[in-house]
Image: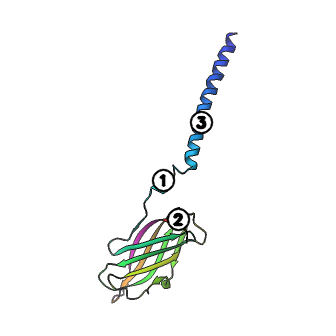
Amino acid sequence: MQNTNKGQAAIEFLVTYGWAIMGAIIVIGALSYFGIFNTQRYVNDICYFGDQFTCEDYVAYQNGSVGLQLRNNFGVEIDINSTIIKSNYGTAMCQLNDILPSSTNIQPGTTFNVRCKVSSTAISLNDKLKYKMILTFKRTNSTNLHNQTGDVTITVQKP
């Protein structure tokens, strides 16, 4: 008779803690479903190219295209030679005709736009897109090429 009482106490113990563990799993699942554990939503959008180029504006679209507006702070005219974007969606080489107003003779203090397609597939809306952009340029009266690397983290939006 005493053996059955011990067995019943053990089963009651396991059932009680089983319900508590199941309740905790349900709460953690609900919090995860609503995005509480998504750390990307707490990261600020940033665009940094150092002091030589200032990010005036930047955008990333759901169709995989990105756009930057940069200001030439070198104090001399520059010519952009190439632009490469490295992201978690792959590497993209921007065409020189994607640099507006043109890739030649960007005056000091002038802004210019760079538009590229970093992905051929759709990017999730409100996802954070992180990429590095490498601008290869030269001063107008020079033949030496220089690289400037910038880091961009931006929230993806609808086009």
Q: Which mark is residue 23?
A: 3
Gap in angstroms between the C-alphas marked 3 and 1: 24 Å
Q: What amino acid does circle 2 point to?
A: Asn
Assign a secondary structure to mark 2.
loop
| Mark 1 neighbour density, 10 Å: few (under 14) some (14–19) many (20 or more) | few
Residue 156, visible in the rendered structure: yes
Residue 129: percent from left, percent from top: 50, 65
Residue 144, visible in the rendered structure: no
Q: Is residue 153 magenta?
A: yes
Q: Give whichever of 13, 136 is nearer the camera.
A: 13
| Mark 3 neighbour density, 10 Å: few (under 14) some (14–19) many (20 or more) | few
Task: Judge whether 87 appears above or below 8 on screen.
Answer: below
Q: Residue at x 58, y 71 (%)?
A: 63
In the picture, the quarter occupied by the C terminus is bottom right
Q: Residue at x 40, y 72 (%)?
A: 149
Residue 150: percent from left, percent from top: 41, 70
Q: Which residue is mark 2?
A: 88
Q: Is residue 3 left or right of residue 37?
A: right
Mark 3 or mark 1, earlier in chain: 3
Gap in angstroms between the C-alphas marked 2 and 1: 17 Å
Q: Which mark is residue 39?
A: 1
